[in-house]
Every structure is written in C-alpha cells, then in structure tokens.
Image (cartoon, helix red, strand yellow):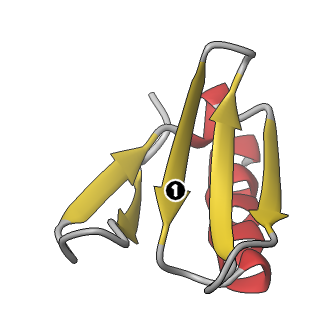
Amino acid sequence: MPKLCKFTSPSDGKPVYVNPDQVSVVYTFKGQPPDTIIAFRKDFQLGVKESLEETVRILESAAERTDR
C-alpha cells in the first residue's frame, strides 16, 4: 500500500491525506487567491493550500518510493 501524502486544507489549515495512486490530475484554479486542486477521477476534487509545484513534487516523490 502506498504511503499517504499530507497536504493542508486551505479553508481551515487542517491536514488532509491523499493516496497518490488515486490522483488523476493536479491543476491550478485561477481564482483569487489561486487554488491548487487535486482531482480523483471525475467525481471528486480536493483543494489544497500548497502550490502546484510543491503538490506535484510531493506526489512524484511518493510515486518514486512505491516503484522500488
């Protein structure tokens, strides 16, 4: 089982945990302030406080650990 990735909820600052194997896409919603969105298939989206670059780095790092 892959290790869960820890992110921060933008609304209340609490931690949220993501299974990197279930992530479909990561993108930035261009609101004010811009939000980083992690999407799981087409049904569920999660906003996180981390930047797009940091989110992708965390998810890629987790994927590298499980590939070994």
**Residue 31 x %, y %:** 71, 73
> In which image quadrant can residue 12 be found?
bottom left
* Front residue of 27 and 55: 27
Q: As drawn, which residue projects farthest toward the front? A: 32
* Residue drawn 37% across the image and 64% down it: 6
Q: Note whether 56 is above or below 22 in the view shown.
A: below
**Rendered position, 24 above or below 63:** above
Disc 1: CA contacts within 10 A as few (<14), some (14-19) or many (>=20)? many
Q: Where is residue 4? Give x, y as percent.
A: 40, 48
Q: Which residue is mark 1?
A: 47
| Quadrant location of the N terminus in the rendered image | top left
Query: Which residue appears at 61% of the width and 58% of the height?
Result: 62
Above or below residue 11? Residue 20 is: above
Placement of 32 over or under 3, stated as above or below: below
Q: Quadrant of residue 16?
A: bottom left
Residue drawn at the location 37% of the way across and 72% of the way down: 10
Q: Secondary structure at mark 1?
A: strand
Question: Given the image, on which type of amino acid does mark 1 rest?
Answer: Gly
Compared across the picture, whether 58 is left or right of 3 comes to right
Q: Residue at x 55, y 81 (%)?
A: 50
- 58 or 32, which is in the foreground? 32
Residue 5 lies, in percent from the top left, at 45, 57
- In the rendered structure, the answer to whether residue 48 lies left or right of residue 37 reads left
